[in-house]
Image (spheres, helix red, strand yellow):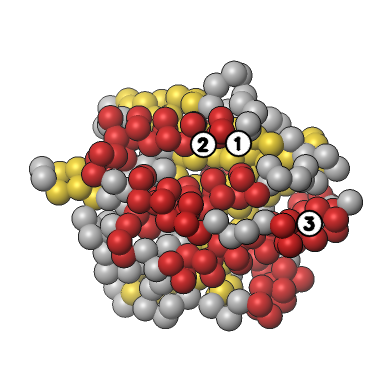
Amino acid sequence: MIRLFCTALLFVMQVSYGQMLDDIRQLSSPEMQGRETGSAGAEMARHFISQRYQSLELESFGNAYQHAFTYAGWQEKTGTNVLAYRQGCRYPQQYIVISAHYDHLGQTGHKIFFGADDNASGVAALLELAARLSEVCPAYSYIFLATDAEENGLYGSKAFVANPPVELSSIVLNLNLDMIGRAGKRGRLYLTGAKRYPALMSQLDAEFVKVQFLSHSGPPRTIRSNTRYDWPEASDHGPFHRAGIRYLFFGGHEHPDYHTPEDTWQKIDSDFLATAMQAIWRTVQWLEQQPPAVLKGQ
């Protein structure tokens, strides 16, 4: 059944890069005001994502796609995650969480931090995966988690892990997507967490020369000469990792426009985005063929 699923989608699904680019353009538009947590732009982004969930007929937890949470900085703040799920057929009680943060840095004066790569690109990929996994009943159940307040300290994923809609023990993997729309200096897409799955690494290594595998353990990797990068804490997979849930994290290098107003949709590299989406989709197809014990490492 799983082989039939993968074969059918491999030949039937068409890569919707036009839709992905349009999603990135809309999420990073001036009207979204940089999607800062608590802003009107963030509310617009949530509405956009919720509408897409509804159009794909994804199911909701508690009759709502939007789930508010509070977190403490110098004062208590409120964020809102947007989540939905697709029930699986072979392992319906086993969940893979696909996550991508939709928030960004907002607006300072007349300067808007558009956040096209960071992380409208990841949200666009999440929505693309939701569409593909709606074509045929997948083996696993999938939760699509668009997180808020990642930029402030991974608070959206922390809130999800602290108060999950399903038992944490039923979550076999977190697939996290963050900044997949532009290449860094080395022109590479980075994947961390995969060294626990040698067969997956072999498949991706054979098909995608631009994918570089990084260890999830050991000392932080050097990204720039003056920056130390802690990959397990780099994005929303961090709280899953701390909870003992395995993760795969797809992300690009930081680039000169990272966290600046120059991170616009016009600078998205469509070829790099296509390569990233193909690698992510091949990964999902591989996951679909594995029993839960393999994904959990039991």
Left/right of residue 234 with respect to residue 285 in the rendered view: left
Amino acid found under the numbered disc labelled 3:
Ala
Q: Which residue is mark 3?
A: 8
Amino acid found under the numbered disc labelled 2:
Arg
Q: Which residue is mark 2?
A: 52
Identify the element where label 1 is drawn.
loop
Q: Quadrant of the C terminus?
A: bottom right
Q: Residue lying farthest right? A: 1
Q: Residue at x 44, y 45 (%)?
A: 101
Q: Residue at x 34, y 74 (%)?
A: 224
Badges 2 and 3: C-beta atoms under 8 Å apart? Answer: no
Residue 218 in sight: no
Q: Which of the 4 image quarters holds residue 248?
A: bottom right
Q: Which residue is mark 1?
A: 56
Q: Residue at x 43, y 67 (%)?
A: 270
Q: Where residue 3 sits: x, y (%)?
A: 85, 58
Badges 1 and 3: C-beta atoms under 8 Å apart? Answer: no
In the image shown, does 59 or 21 lie closer to the viewer?
21
Badges 2 and 1: C-beta atoms under 8 Å apart? Answer: yes
Left/right of residue 131 with respect to residue 95 in the rendered view: left
**Numbered mark located on residue 251 in the image:** none
In the image shown, does 291 or 124 lie closer to the viewer?
124
Left/right of residue 153 with respect to residue 83 in the rendered view: left
Q: Where residue 103 sits: x, y (%)?
A: 37, 42
Q: CA distance from mark 1 to mark 3?
A: 19 Å
